[in-house]
Amino acid sequence: MKRREFVGGLAAAASVAACTGEEQGCESGAVASGETFEWSCVTSWPPKYPGLGIAVNNLAERIEKASNGRLKIKVYGGGELVPPLEVFDAVQRGVVEMGHGASYYHKGKVDAAQFFTAIPFGMNAAELDGWLYYGGGLELWRELYAPFNIVPFPCGNTGVQMGGWFNREINSVEDLQGLKMRIPGLGGEVMQRAGATAWALPGSEIFTSLQTGVVDAAEWVGAYNDVALGLHEAASYYYYPGWHEPSAGLELVVNAEAWATLPPDLQALVGLACQAITTDMLAEYTHGNAQALQQLNDDPNVEVRPFPDDVLRVLKSHTRDIVDEMSAKHPEWKKIAESYYAFLEKSTPNQLATEVANLATRSL
Ligand code: CA
């Protein structure tokens, strides 16, 4: 579909190689013209889902309006055109021009991509942006995806997530033994090492899996999205913090050949629209989570409680072990991990002295 827009061939593909920095600085072989583009964007989210899914529809609407109709993007919910977790492959193969999802879904195919969504005990949303835009993170991301014929853009962030829904109490590490939990990415690997079994189910399958006991626990996003899925009606214990996702950066992935056919002004527009969506999504979650958590705190059938510190310590220790083992085995992982942790360590004292210290004053 829409393969005709892919004409541009090798010259266009070569021009995208120069596009590794800021979108506004990208040059392409195409020239600005009145040519119109009709693209398709597949997503990993349930159709028009609050936060994640609505953001992609907003992205498409804003780009179409700001381009005066020169770039039209038709958005497909997960499963409408391709399965939710096959977005990356569809864009790589040129089945569609664009996709929206999370880079940690590519675990097993592009393991190091996890750094750009969430690393357990890692960066919050502001730090992730700081690293991506000013600390070299985005260049590393583009370099990582180049062999897959894909140009990535940071496009959305949920902010810090919740630890998830459990149908049993977690009072010690022993309670994780044999636990079946929906939790993707590196967080899932950490849970496996702690004795649980991790599943990476798409959002659309979480409620039924939790309610019927296919899984004993499930993390999705946070109060806003979890209530929308009805997870509070499938399990009683709602744990925090989201140690596994201190923020979750989403991605817009664009087929490199398709990208090269866009004139520079439309390329710049896509980059700007993604940055606007990141701001907008965080605002929607900040507002929606506040309301939904209040609802859950008032719900007599739900108990919102923290994970015990000693459980978190064990999970943190497994995280460092896995990151170090991967660094020893895979040079591309090591390169990204070194950049990520160098910034995280530099940033932590500042976060403690500013965000954390200020939040603490609210309960004085
Ligand atoms: Ca999550």
Image (cartoon, grey):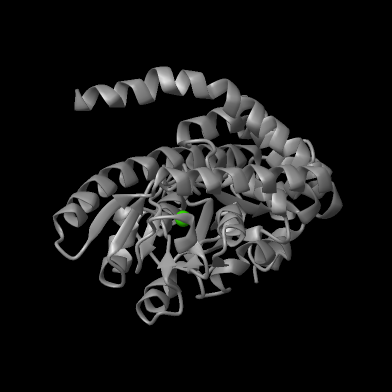
Q: Position of residue 62 (x, y in %)?
A: 42, 47
Q: Nearer the viewer, residue 73 or 253?
A: 253
Quadrant location of the N terminus in the rendered image: bottom right
Q: Nearer the viewer, residue 151 or 345?
A: 345
Q: Is residue 212 visible?
A: yes
* Position above or below: 24 against 329: above
For the point 33% across and 60% down, which residue is it? 226
Q: Is residue 29 visible?
A: no
Direction right: furthest residue: 10
- Location of residue 334 by image quarter: top right
Quadrant location of the C terminus in the rendered image: top left
Q: Position of residue 87 (x, y in %)?
A: 61, 64
Q: Position of residue 302 (x, y in %)?
A: 22, 62
For the point 72% across and 38% down, which residue is it? 336
| Residue 107 as seen in the image, left or right of residue 294 | right
For the point 43% across and 55% down, which residue is it? 172
For the point 50% across and 75% down, which residue is it? 80
| Residue 246 as seen in the image, left or right of residue 26 | left
* Position above or below: 259 against 334: below
Direction bottom: furthest residue: 212
- Location of residue 166 by image quarter: bottom left
